[in-house]
Image (spheres, rainbow, N blue to C red):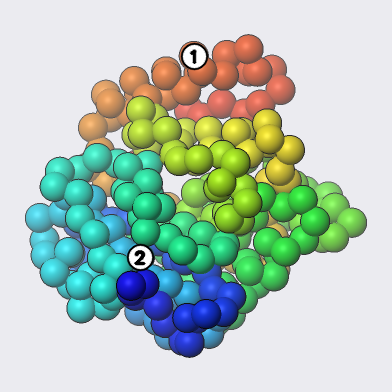
Amino acid sequence: MWTGLRDGCRGGEFASVVIPAHNHLQDLSMPCIDSVLLHTRYPYQFILVDDGSADGSYQYFRTVTEDAYRLSSRSGPAAARNLALLHAYGDPIVFLDNDMIVPQGWLTILAEECRKPGVGIVAAIPSNEMERLRRQPSADMLLEFPCVSGAGMAVTRQCFNAVGYFDESLMNSGEDTDFCYRALERGFRVANTPRLIIEHHAGGTRRGLDKREMERAARRFRKKYIKHQHTLPMPPLYPFG
């Protein structure tokens, strides 16, 4: 039985909205979840993943949706998103970080933009990445880039079926960039939409991560894409947050 479906999405078109979180229930997760519940009219399946929290996040998530899952220890956003993907039935699949606050109509915009020809990934513009608005738009008003942030990123079902899951070896240092690059390799468009800006308290999801592990993940990413380093952006070797 499908669970966690909201606003009459059984039997019709709907999205899957995924939020992974590690701790920070009161200051990040609850405001983020409240904004989704308050500002979303497009039909959606709500999937919440507790990435090894110790603050009661999972217990709270279960009061919000039946599609609440838990990793027993902190494994990073790639693993949390992959767990959600095992249970995601919607199209598109939309990933939010728990340090975001969505505005009214946000999911309707992303669903509409995903229907444009060739689109595999389309993302909101996080409030800390406003410089992306300077990019010259395409004919259908998308801002195409080699990669977009995994925070506020919508992936079409067709793209996910072709690209697969996130690379968990990259922890939280390029796993979303890697996903975008794999989509590009398969001929999908990757873009931001100027129609949607989402408030993003950048770095909130990275609090407490092992910096040494993040550096190792960044090195793994660079090794994977070293032959493309002159044409594709590389994530920072020494991540912050």
Lateral position of residue 185 relative to residue 14, left or right: right
Which image quarter: residue 162? Answer: top right
The residue positioned 53% from the left and 85% from the top of the image is: 41
Cα separation, mark 1 vs mark 2, equals 33 Å
Label 1: few (<14), some (14–19) or many (≥20) C-alpha neighbours in 10 Å: few
Report the amino acid beneath label 2: Ile
Would you place residue 222 above or below residue 26 in this image? above
The residue positioned 27% from the left and 24% from the top of the image is: 212
Q: Find residue 223 and name its label.
A: 1
Report the amino acid beneath label 1: Lys
The residue positioned 28% from the left and 58% from the top of the image is: 49
Q: Position of residue 38 (x, y in %)?
A: 43, 85
Q: Quadrant of the N terminus?
A: bottom left
Q: Nearer the viewer, mark 1 or mark 2?
A: 2
Q: Quadrant of the C terminus?
A: top left
Instruction: Tell me, yes or no, if residue 29 can be seen here.
Output: no
Task: Please report whichever mark, 1 or 2, sits nearer to the chain's N-terminal start.
Answer: 2
Residue that badge 2 annotates: 47
Mark 2: secondary structure: strand
Would you place residue 70 above or below residue 43 in this image? above
Near-viewer residue (126 or 109):
109
Q: Find residue 27 and name its label.
A: none
Mark 1: secondary structure: helix
Lateral position of residue 226 relative to residue 35, left or right: right
Q: What residue occupies the far front of the structure in this picture?
A: 1
